[in-house]
Image (spheres, rainbow, N blue to C red):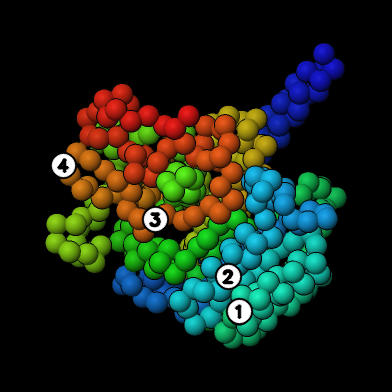
Amino acid sequence: MFEKAIRRARRSARRAQVATVYPLAALDSARRRRPPDPASTSACGGAPDVQPSGVFAAVPHWRSQPDARTAPASSAAPHDVDRSQIFVDCIKSLLDLDVDRVVVAVLTNEPRETARDLSSRLAASSSDVPVSTLPDLRAFNGPHADGRQVVVIGWRPGLIRRHGYYLTWAHKPLFRRALEDPGLSHFIYLEDDMRFTSESLAYWCRFREPLARHGLLPGFVRYEVFDDARYVVDQKTRQSVDQVDRQGVVLSQPDTGRGSGLDLRFVSLNNPYQGMYVIDRELAIDHLWNSPARSSLLSRSIKWPTDVQLRAAIIRERAAIGPILDDVPPGFGSRNVVPLQMPRPGEYRLDPACLIEHLTGNYSRSRKAFGKIRVEDLFLPATSDPHAAGISPRQ
């Protein structure tokens, strides 16, 4: 009985927290929005395929003692997974981006140990990248070096935001300071157990401008590999592409840059979450000064998810939504949309360009509802129902 009373009290407190945010959000939306600076707009804001000039990436990494196998700042991994190596693989994927300049900021509760471990593992993998350490966010005055560098920055809970989950929100002030460097054109927030490649960045830049005409953004789909098959991480059910059920935008060959007849249809997914986001300078200015998702408090006014209690609880997930739920066009569930190929009439499949790997593999190996649908089976054939295709999610 006592435990039930505690749970009820927590639910009531979370609902109250969300309810108190609405007046603040109304005042915030009534203030004058800060317009983008034309001199600071994105390198991708003109024509597609413009090479980014520099990338600033922020990665939260909660380091547990005596090792780093579990992390409040990201999803728990299976016990046989070396989280330290997965973290290094995540950082290496960013350092390997095909861009002249890459700055990776690692936010962590244990900066010295994290920097020491990261330095030794990068050296062992022949990655000659300097790793520096800063005690806290106040010591970060923006990136100053060219080439590639990793900055490990210490973080401690505050008087109000005491939970370790708030580590994921510490990247917002870093982005604001990094914006002062005109050599940085793109900003990436990435959970510490994902691999983001040059192909992923090229895909985002390719479709940034064509989709912006519709108020949309290129989205990503996280997947895991289990028993030599790829499984979608963030969707529980197969999804319909029929126009009566889901709004979409079709980009033709001039916008896709592909062969004739290879048009792509972009649609939003039932669950928009992707564990990361990419923004260029234009998006960054608008997001960091105007979006309710710029703040852990104001973000609770965003009606995602619909369950108010859950909305107050998912601190880490709200930190990763970026601008994808701002000014969503009518008919779409979010601004981030993913590309679909149609290999045969009425059959839809995800274009591989939008796939990014979730390295821990914990969803596909667990009994949770997530991570049970193959990448190739995410979308139902046109005008079909979930049973007509003869395919069901893996149990």
Residue 354, numbered label = 3
Q: What kind of element bears circle 4?
A: loop
Q: CA distance from mark 3 to mark 1?
A: 27 Å
Quadrant assignment, res 137: bottom right
Residue 351 placement (x, y as % from top left)? 32, 53
Question: Quick one: label 2 or label 4, which is nearer the N terminus?
Answer: 2
Question: Are discs 1 and 2 less than 8 Å apart at CB?
Answer: yes
Residue 97 placement (x, y as % from top left)? 49, 73
Residue hosting label 2: 92
Residue 180 placement (x, y as % from top left)? 60, 76
Question: Quick one: label 1 or label 2, which is nearer the N terminus?
Answer: 2
Residue hosting label 4: 345
Q: Amino acid at mark 3?
A: Cys
Quadrant assignment, res 200: bottom left
**Residue 312 vs residue 110, the one in the foreground:** 110
Q: CA distance from mark 3 to mark 4?
A: 22 Å
Residue located 60% across and 79% down the image? 127
Q: Residues within 10 Å of mark 4 (few under 14, many from 20)?
A: few
Q: Is residue 119 visible?
A: yes
Q: Residues within 10 Å of mark 2 (few under 14, many from 20)?
A: some
Residue located 45% across and 76% down the image? 98
Residue hosting label 1: 127
Q: What kind of element bears circle 2?
A: helix
Q: Amino acid at mark 4?
A: Pro
**Residue 21 vs residue 63, the one in the foreground:** 63
